[in-house]
Image (cartoon, grey):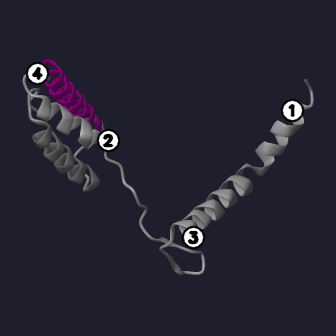
């Protein structure tokens, strides 16, 4: 892989190697090596873009503020969720209840023995 490849090319190469690995045509070590090199290239490209934006802020404020506003954008809503009974939930309060039920089941059932050990250990101080 070319060390100075563009991030888009890096992503395409990474996808091709992943497909090859899944089909058994590429060894795991080679796949990991390419993925790590691609990750490094992407990080370097992002750093270079941010550095150039910071250096050119006095001359080109529009590009800087466009980049910042793109980074600040977040998802306002959550996709519809499904209840255990199979009903589609679209209202925010219902979604919150579904998530609360799910996480309370996960953390209570899987960590119940751990939480009793923690509470017992606190009394020793």
Residue in view at x 15 percent, y 28 percent: 49
Residue sitting nearer the eye, 107 or 23: 107
Crowd tier of the residue under label 2, counting other residues whose Cα lies within 10 Å: few below 14, some 14–19, many 20 or above: few
Q: Label 4, on which residue? A: 56
Q: Residue at coordinates 90% horizontally, 23% vertically from top-left?
A: 125
Picture coordinates of residue 18 (x, y %)? 24, 49
Instruction: Name which of mark 3 and mark 4 comes first in the sequence.
Output: 4
Q: CA distance from mark 4 to mark 2?
A: 20 Å
Quarter-of-image position of residue 86: bottom right
Q: Residue furthest top?
A: 55
Secondary structure under the numbered disc 2 in the rendered image: helix
| Residue at numbered disc 2 | 72
Q: In front of the other: label 2 or label 1? A: 2
Residue 12 tag number: none
Q: Nearer the viewer, mark 4 or mark 1?
A: 4
Instruction: Magenta stretch: give its range.
Output: 31-56
Quote the CA–CA distance across marks 4 and 1: 57 Å
Contact check, label 4 and label 2, Cβ < 8 Å: no
């Amino acid at each position: 892989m070319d060390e100075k490849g563009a991030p888009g090319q890096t992503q395409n190469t990474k996808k091709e190697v992943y497909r090859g690995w899944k089909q058994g045509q590429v060894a795991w070590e080679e796949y990991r090596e390419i993925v790590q090199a691609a990750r490094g290239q992407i990080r370097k490209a992002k750093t270079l873009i941010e550095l150039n934006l910071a250096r050119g802020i006095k001359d080109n404020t529009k590009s800087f503020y466009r980049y910042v506003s793109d980074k600040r954008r977040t998802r306002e809503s959550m996709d519809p969720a499904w209840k255990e009974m199979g009903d589609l939930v679209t209202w925010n309060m219902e979604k919150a209840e579904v998530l609360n039920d799910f996480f309370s089941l996960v953390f209570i059932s899987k960590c119940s023995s751990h939480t009793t050990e923690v509470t017992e250990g606190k009394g020793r101080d």
